[in-house]
Amino acid sequence: MSLAVSSYLVGWSSLLSGFVFIISLVFLTLMFSTKTSPWGPLNDVSYVMALLLIVPALFGFYRALNATRPAAAAIALILSVSGILIISITQIRLVLNHIAFKSNLKQGSFGSGLQGIGFVLFHLVHLQTATIPEGLVWLGLISGALLALGIPTSLFYVDEELEILTGKADWKKVNKMAVVVMSLTFIGQIGLFAWVIWYGMHLISL
């Protein structure tokens, strides 16, 4: 497969990931607004699909950077893919009722953090090599840094996250730092949505 064809396919995979992310967000909104059961599993499955569609782009990054920064490229790939796999497995287990929601939140947040760290590392190398547009690099860096906050969420704020997501939080007493960290992580997810669409359009237009 030629490099041009490979980039074109990765571009469409990334673009499709962005569209599936949007669908997942719609399901998430319906889940919280209607409190009915179908939307939660649909959100989980669509979110996993969107993440898996990012994987070709990550391997493309690795291939592009391996010649100049092999160690950094390998570490970034391992962290990013490991994070996506952790999220995917825990979300599917939740859909199948094989894991408690609290454990799912803990594992998912940690996976998101690993993915974010890998994303930051990839884009730090891209910042040095100027292989993709600078604006795209900065969006990736910011989104990755915010996603990396999933690790402190997993380690310190799972109880607060559970209370907030289940509607049981006492907003007068809730840990304000937990709210800030969770909000920033969610912004990182939105940034990731924007990044995959922008990156996909960039590759397709080459």
Image (cartoon, rainbow, N blue to C red):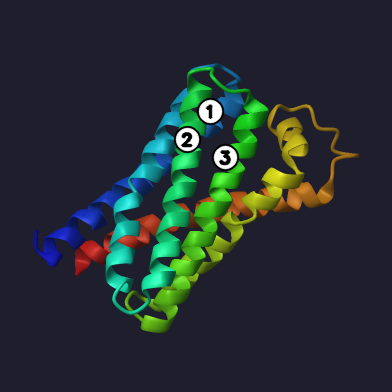
User: Percent from the top left, x then y, of residue 5?
Assistant: 12, 60
Q: Is residue 191 left or right of residue 14?
A: right
Disc 1 versus disc 3: distance between alpha carbons?
21 Å
- Checking the image for residue 26, the label placed there is 2
| Quadrant of residue 11 within the rendered picture | bottom left
Q: Amino acid at mark 2?
A: Val
Could you tell me which residue is drawn at 19 percent across and 70 percent down? 206
Asked whether 2 or 39 is in front, the reply is 2
Q: Amino acid at mark 3?
A: Gly
CB within 8 Å, label 2 to label 1: yes
Say which element carries label 3: helix
Disc 2 versus disc 1: distance between alpha carbons?
6 Å
Q: What residue occupies the far front of the structure in this picture?
A: 71
Q: Which residue is mark 3?
A: 108
Q: Is residue 47 left or right of residue 163?
A: left
User: Percent from the top left, x then y, of residue 70?
Assistant: 36, 72
Q: Is residue 193 left or right of residue 144?
A: left
Mark 1 or 3, closer to the camera: 3
- Image quadrant holding the N terminus, namely bottom left
